[in-house]
Amino acid sequence: MPHAESPESASTVFDFDQLELHPEQPAASAADAGAEPQDLFSASESSLDVPENPATIAPRKRPKPGERRAQILQTLATMLEQPGAERITTAALAAKLDVSEAALYRHFASKAQMFEGLIEFIEQSVFSLVNQIATREGTPAQQTGSVVTMLLQFGEKNPGMTRVMVGDALVFENERLQQRMNQFFDKIEATLKQNLRGDAALEASATPTVDGQLLASLLTALVVGRLQRFARSGFKRLPTEYLEASLAKLLQI
């Protein structure tokens, strides 16, 4: 695999079989689950249950009924992990799975729906972890730092998903896919702004609401920029590089 995992990383895998695709609707809210983080800032020591790369799940040679759908998404995620990969066609995906293109369309109405399956995985995984962080004790700045750390750990563990998140894999695909990822980051920014309410440093400002919005926007740009650098470096520049020190500086911890 082209990425390194943190030594203390958790290993829970989110199962594609559990996802229900609704192409014309936003993903449903994810349920809370699993373990809690211990270190709110450290990318190397956090125990956040960041989902492992679904592409690492070995597919069955003879999938049981309903498993072929998950296998298609896992294979698509694997193909997206190849640095410099061109646009993935249904013909190439079918060849990788050793099935016909018609077999793909028995499970997905279009390639866009396959990408929506990956996006739904991202949404459910990330916002499930956001919900976990929101229930923890900690200062507003610490919770905000936890969300940023989790997002970058998720990208680091899931390089194929990172290409979807930053739009590289969606350039020649249906426009609604990029719009959905834009909405994802808008929601992340709103979450960060909400987390920063009540932060002592911001409350001491003459314009705490404006400053909170600016900081949330800056942190969202940090996440997107680091994920883009990770994808465009061929997954060599890790998004969690110098993260703890960067967050301490930005959040004045």
Image (cartoon, helix red, strand yellow):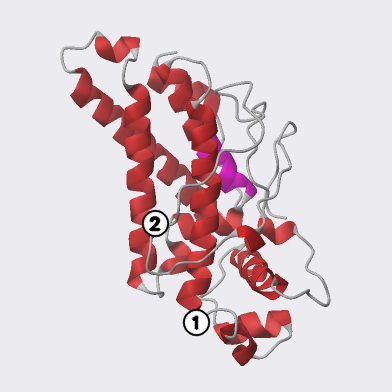
| Residue 160 to residue 131: above or below | below
Q: Is residue 123 visible?
A: yes
The answer to which quarter of the image holds residue 242 is top right
**Chain-order first, disc 2 or disc 1:** 1
- Counting from the top left corner in percent of width and height, residue 216 is at 32, 32
Left or right position of 7 against 74: right
Residue type of the residue flagged with mark 2: Met
- Counting from the top left corner in percent of width and height, residue 43 is at 60, 30
The answer to which quarter of the image holds residue 98 is bottom right
Q: Give the range drawn in magenta.
A: 150-157
- Counting from the top left corner in percent of width and height, residue 141 is at 42, 19
Mark number, residue 181 = 2
Which quadrant does the N terminus fall into? bottom right
Which quadrant does the C terminus fall into? top left
Farthest residue toward the right? 61
Q: Is residue 237 visible?
A: no
The residue positioned 34% from the left and 38% from the top of the image is: 189
Secondary structure beneath dot 2 equals: helix
Look at the magenta stretch and give its main secondary structure.
helix
